[in-house]
Image: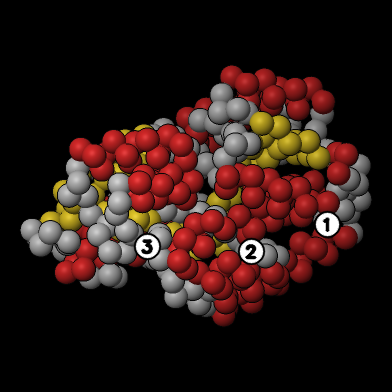
Amino acid sequence: MKKKLVSLLTVSAMTMAMLVGCGEAAADTATQAPAAETATEAPAAETAETAAEAVAETAGNADLADKKVGVCIYQFADNFMTLFRTELENYLISQGFSKDNITIVDGANDQATQTNQIQNFITQGVDVLIINPVNSSSAATITDLVVGADIPLVYINREPDADEEARWSANSWNVTYVGCDARQSGTMQGEIIVDLGQDKVDLNGDGKIQYIMIEGDPENVDAQYRTEFSVKALEDAGWTVDCLDDQVGNWDQATAQQLVANSLSAHPETEVVFCNNDAMALGALQSIEAAGRKVGEDIYLVGVDALTEALEDVLAGTMTGTVFNDHIAQSHGAADAAINYITGAGNDYYIGCDYVKVTTDNAQSVLDSLK
């Protein structure tokens, strides 16, 4: 299966060039995380810029104003997907689509609701579908529905499994996935902790790192990989770890706040809190502060997404670090893939991009790039 880097708009390329759990859920499906990177080398940026220009030229030569795009988001309440869908819509419009012909719907975190929305889009005769599935395990059913209607399909954010992706290639279907490999994000979370040094993180000096894990949706591959690979990074560094608690926060800040409050009460010896996303990390921070503890002094906290509030906390020292989940590159890549299908250019079956590790060293640069 071919893979290529997605940072298809010049600004995304510039951003990436500038930024110089007890987890066993995915052990059977992945053996090695991609190499963690803190910067994108110049050739990748040049490739991204060239790709952006090529797609822009293709879009400019096509009449996209009358083309209909259906977009299914698993849940509008998700902070990251709000950034993603807003950027996606704006970029589609900038490429020549009419705002009136772009319809984005909220799956309300219910697969039955989303499946009905997909069927409605098919009935309406949209020219392309961009889908962030509620359940990755439903991808085969979704693919069959959309391919059966002869509509190109771009999956985003939640990657279908390898068997499903293999079907696209085997059948030469117009289906692709655009997103980052979550194993890399988990690895980077762990590396942020490892980079601090074991002597600093092992607050009680017992030779072990006591941690609690707050997972997203346990069915979601991103949650599985982040849970597994964040801890694996510590173990690969030769550290001994002790999982005190592993709870499901379903990506939600309020849920995570309560879970972490309970965990800290039961396990005051906690040294690290891993959260599968920043929304839950922000909830965790509320409970950490309510317990009278200070991140960076007597506990450490990491998330994923690089939400604005999380970046500000990293700069303030109230969050140890996060991982930039590049919604700009991913949303532009999804739109470009849709354009390629509409214009007949076609796509690879997997279009990937890199995460970026974020600490106090580069948080301001990432924050500036998002303004």
Between the residue at mark 3 and the residue at mark 2, the CA separation in whole angstroms equals: 20 Å
Whether label 3 touches label 1, CB < 8 Å: no
Looking at the image, which is closer to me, 173 or 277?
A: 277
Q: Is residue 10 left or right of residue 227?
A: right
Q: Residue at x 60, y 27 (%)?
A: 108
Dot 1 or dot 2, earlier in sequence: 1
Q: Which residue is mark 1?
A: 94
Q: Which residue is mark 3?
A: 320
Q: Residue at x 40, y 60 (%)?
A: 318
364 above or below 353? below
Q: Secondary structure at mark 2?
A: loop
Q: Secondary structure at mark 3?
A: loop
* Residue 193 screen position, x and y as percent: 29, 63
* Residue 344 screen position, x and y as percent: 78, 49
Is residue 98 in view? Answer: yes
Q: Which residue is mark 2?
A: 370
* Residue 271 screen position, x and y as percent: 23, 54
Q: Which of the image's four quarters has the C terminus?
A: bottom right
Please count the marks in the image.
3
Looking at the image, which is closer to me, 47 or 200?
A: 200
